[in-house]
Every structure is written in structure tokens, then in C-alpha cells.
Image (tube, rainbow, N blue to C red):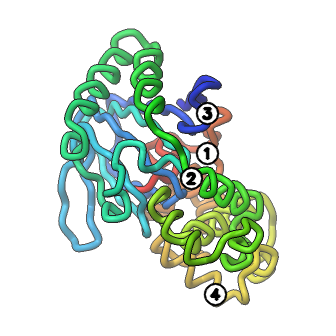
Amino acid sequence: MELPPPPDLQRHVRCLWVLRDDTPGDEMQVIYPDGCCELLAELGVPLRFHGADGQVRADQPFCFAAQQLGPVRLQAAGAVFCIGVRLQPACSALVAGQRLPGLRDHAPDLYTLDAPFAVGFGDAARAYAATQSPEPLWRLLRARCAGFAPDALVEQAVAMLDAADGDLRIAGLARRLGVALRTLQPRFLAAVGMTPKEYARVRRLQALLRTLDAEDADIADAAARHGYSDQAHATHDVVSWTGVTPARLVRALRGDRSGDDALRLAAAFVRGTSAGPVPAAPGLHAARGGAGR
């Protein structure tokens, strides 16, 4: 379930989501980067995180999912009850502050970033669990956002990249914004936790996958439509960000939902939005919407 934020928080927060499953399966599930960071509360049994290094470790009960530059592999270890706050890209530093760029590919314990806020977040998450009302979380976030001013230049840059589905050269983006590239790049990284080029690649990847899902287009045609120089370029990006080839993803998107490991829920990632429930197989992937970790 995903809930949009109230109007006064929409500049800072993209959505609140909740996933509860008392009897989850133990299949591996994968989350792809979407350019957003998240505040996470795991009130059930913490999920198992399978690292690229082969190590398996449990999530922290309260953590900050920073930007991820590749797929995240998760596995349920018991009853799942997750509450997440997905931040707007330009507000990714709301809790992490200046440490944000150094947290890429990590999900640190929220207490290590801001212990008083972590206590408040934990209390608000448990209050939601008890009352089914998001208002305690909105109150906490209002207080936090009141002292946080997003970088308006980065907000403009994000909006332009979103509107172009990432198919925009970064030098041209800087010119349209009226700033030097050397000005845009560090400010974008500090605010979003990704470089402008990385964020553009994520947006373009998502647009490519939506096209492959919605239409009977072949990979080469879809790649050309979204600004990839050729099919090889698109394949490289898809493998880099998702860990699988475009052909395997297409098979998952077009009906092979019972295939191996991560591909079962590929469609949930592509179709998941904050506007309503995901019309696909239920699971961790659908609920967390491709969040960075």
C-alpha cells in the first residue's frame, strides 16, 4: 500500500508505503534503483540482505536506504511488516546531511545518522502500526522538513531529467539551468546522492522498461526511442543496474512471472506507482518500488 503525502510535505516526500505479510515466501526478491532514498522501519522480522560480495546480513530495524547503483537482493526470514518513507530525490539529504554521497550502496542504521530522529521515527512507525493512521509520521516529518531547505537548482534539474525520462545530456542540462557544469555536478551529488549522469541513467532505464512492458516493441527499437546509441548500450545499462539482460527482463515482463529468482517480480517494479496498488504479484519488490539502499 502506498499513500501520498499531505500537500505541505509534497516538496520533500514522495510517498509513504506499508508492506505487511505474516506468511511470506522465501524467494529472493530484487529491487532496482529509482533515484529515491528512503527511511525504513522493519517492525517484523528484519529482511535478509544478500550482498554482491556473497555475504548475507539482516537489515537494521530502522535504517536509511541510500542511493543504490545496482540491484538489491532481499529475502524474508519471517513475518514482514515494513513501513517506508520515500523522499523526493532533491531531499535525499533530509536526515543524512553532508554524509549522503558517502552512503551510496549502503543502508546504515538510522541511529548512526541522527539518534533523536531515529527514536522519533521508531515511535511514529509503531504508532502507525497501532492506529493505522499516518499522522504521527507526517507530524515527525513536518518538524524535520521545517528546518530543511531543498536546493532549488537541484529540484529544477531533477524535474527536467524526469520530464525527459533521463534522455538529456548533462552539459545541455547545465546550460538550460544557466550554470556551469562544475557548479551543477557537486550540488546535485550533495542533494541527491547520485551524480546527474547517474540519475539520468536511472530515469532512462525506467522509461525503457516501461516501454518494453507496455508495448510489443523489440529491444533495439525501444532503446533507440529512449536515446540509447544502440542495443549494446541499452544492454550494458540494463545489466549494470538490474543484474540481468534485457531479454530476461522482457520474458518476466511479458508473462514469465514464475521464472527464476528476481525476475518473478520485474513487472511489479515497472508498474509500481504512488497512485495506487501495484497490479502484479505481491511482494517486497512491489511495495518498495525500486528504492535505493
Of tags 3 and 4, which is closer to the observer?
3
Q: Quadrant of residue 233?
A: bottom right
Q: Foreground mark, 3 or 2?
A: 3
Q: Which residue is mark 2?
A: 269
Look at 56% across and 53% down and name the residue there: 269
Mark 4 lies on a secondary structure that is helix
Q: How many marks?
A: 4
Which class describes the residues within 10 Å of circle 3: few (<14), some (14-19), or many (20+)? few
- The amino acid type found where label 1 is placed reads Gly
Give me the C-alpha separation between circle 3 and circle 1. 19 Å
Do the numbered discs 3 and 4 sit on residues whose CB atoms are within 8 Å? Answer: no
Question: Can residue 161 be spotted in the picture?
Answer: yes
Mark pair 3, 4: CA separation? 35 Å
Q: CA distance from mark 2 to mark 1?
A: 5 Å
Residue 205 x/y as whole percent: 63, 68
Q: Position of residue 79 (x, y in %)?
A: 28, 32
Q: Position of residue 286 (x, y in %)?
A: 52, 45
Q: Decide: marks 3, 1 in contact (CB < 8 A)? A: no
Label 3: which secondary element = loop
> What residue does disc 4 label?
233
Counting residues from the start of the chain, the first of labels 4 and 2 encountered is 4
The residue wearing badge 1 is: 272
Which residue is disc 3 drawn over? 10
Report, in whole angstroms, how far the alpha carbon at label 3 lies from the one at label 2: 22 Å
In whole angstroms, how far apart are the C-alphas of marks 4 and 1?
25 Å
**How many residues crowd around disc 1 within 10 Å: few (fewer than 14), some, or many (20 or more)?**
many
